[in-house]
Amino acid sequence: MVGCLLLLASFLGQTPQSAIARPLEPGGDSAARLLVQLHAEYRKVEQAAERYHEAQERARHARVRVRELDKRRADQRRVLSGARHTVGHLARQQYRNGDLLPQNYLSVGRNGLQGIFRYQHLLDRLSIQHRSVLAKLWAASESLRALDLDARRSLRLAQNWAARQRTAKQEAERDLQLLQVTTAHLTATQDQQVKELEQEQTDAAQKSFLMTHRLASRHRAPSKSGEKAVTFAFQQVGKPYVWGAEGPGSYDCSGLASRAWSHAGVLIPRTSQEQWRKLARIPLDALRPGDLIIYYRDATHVAIYIGDGQVIHAPRPGAFVKLSPIAFAQVLGAVRPDPQHQPLLQTKPGLTDSAPSSATPA
């Protein structure tokens, strides 16, 4: 565990602090206290990661919006320029015909419709064609003004989300350093005590979960894309958790889920919170391999269901992508990235539902 945290610190450009964690007293109570502390710090890292990814996605969408608006503004400027040219041409015709005074012509030629509207009495002398051209000029001018305003707002929004992204990254790096301080000086005995207690708690939680929740039948099959997502997830087992990573060499929890489904040809939101908000929710008794299990009340962790009451996920700093019982943490619910796809007629080994083995590592 310590080695993985040192690698993670190197990735983030941080140096582990030299502070020594308070030594553990022998016995289960001390291990329980440390486990609670570690879980709290793991949660802080995940929450910061979710804030980072949300800000990253929103900033990206805002920048895309700015680029789209810039293109529309350029197009609208060309429309406005053409309309002004037409109005100027008509104004010169009217002037030659004696219908407009020179100063009115200059007002139209330089200021467009806003200028000629100051001479409302002249509109009655214009033809229907001329009025139509003036109306188009006015519409083009107003449209460009609205696009300019929208672009400024979108740019400010992108800048604000980029600032939030930087703040979330700093928070995550700080929380990771605290986690390093907590774990850096654990003895082998202390580390083993914590792991054994965590496994006991996971086994008990899984047993309780299966007693109170009826999962899908043993023979429920994945969809074609779900099968691809699960196969991809299996191939990532053993790769390290790295905060903010989405492959190919390392992952965080939502990075693994989004990349697995992207590999299957289905684009889903990057963060577990957005996955919970935007994907189709399904009852646990309808689970099929490939569905996503969302954890904690704030939806800050996600795992890929593979059948047999098991999931694959990127657990936390210092750990690796692995198989776990579905109830390794507080289950919030489940979502399906491809609700419109029908399940396959047959399943492959490892993609069926049954009671989990108590020997499966958490």
Image: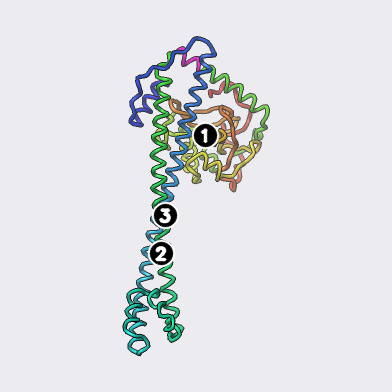
Is residue 191 part of the magenta span, yes or no? yes
Is residue 329 part of the magenta span, yes or no? no
Q: Earlier in the sequence, mark 1 or mark 3?
A: 3
Image quadrant in which you'd find residue 289? top right
| Residue type, label 3 | Arg
| Residue type, label 2 | Arg
Image quadrant in which you'd find residue 298? top right
Q: Position of residue 336 (x, y in %)?
A: 58, 42
Q: Which residue is mark 2?
A: 145
| Residue type, label 1 | His
Query: Disc 3 to disc 2, how far (Cα)?
Result: 13 Å
Q: Secondary structure at mark 1?
A: strand
Please report the bounds of the magenta region as a residue range: 188-194
Q: Earlier in the sequence, mark 1 or mark 2?
A: 2
Q: Residue at x 35, y 71 (%)?
A: 81
Image quadrant in which you'd find residue 226? top right
Q: Residue at x 55, y 43 (%)?
A: 277
